[in-house]
Image: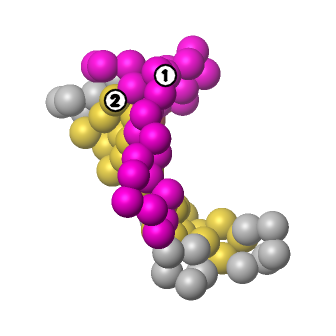
Amino acid sequence: VVRIPDHMGDLINQSALIDKHNSVVTYSVTSHVNHTSTVIFDMRHGLVCYKPDNQDSCFLRRMESLDYENVQSQLN
């Protein structure tokens, strides 16, 4: 877990779960008021899924070249 100040100076927690076997990296970002948003990068399928806090739906898109570079560095 990494604690990062947001634009207001409040600390937020960011954690990463790395699954090398399935080539998936999951980021969870928790705000100072304990709201968590999740982003999943699936290298095998080339997809990014984003689930904002307080929403029932997820947003899905294809990975871009910069996404591949960033996720690959995490998997290594």
| Disc 1 secondary structure class | loop
| Disc 2 secondary structure class | strand
Residue closer to the observer: 29 or 55: 55
Q: Residue at x 54, y 26 (%)?
A: 67
Identify residue type, mark 2. Asp
Identify residue type, mark 1. Met
Q: Residue at x 60, y 21 (%)?
A: 66
Extreme residue in the top direction? 65
In the image, residue 62 sits, relative to residue 71, either above or below, namely above
Q: Residue at x 56, y 19 (%)?
A: 64
- Whether residue 49 is visible to the viewer of this picture, yes or no, is yes
Find out whether residue 48 is within the magenta segment: yes
Residue 65: give x, y in percent of width and height.
57, 15
Q: Residue at x 45, y 62 (%)?
A: 55
Query: How many residues crowd mark 2 within 10 Å: few (<14), some (14–19), many (20+)?
Result: many
Q: CA distance from mark 1 to mark 2?
A: 8 Å
Q: Which residues are magenta?
A: 44-72
Reading the image, the residue beneath label 2 is 42
Task: State the quadrant of the C terminus.
Answer: top left
Reading the image, the residue beneath label 1 is 63
In the image, residue 16 sits, relative to residue 12, either above or below, namely above
- Whether residue 15 is visible to the viewer of this picture, yes or no, is no
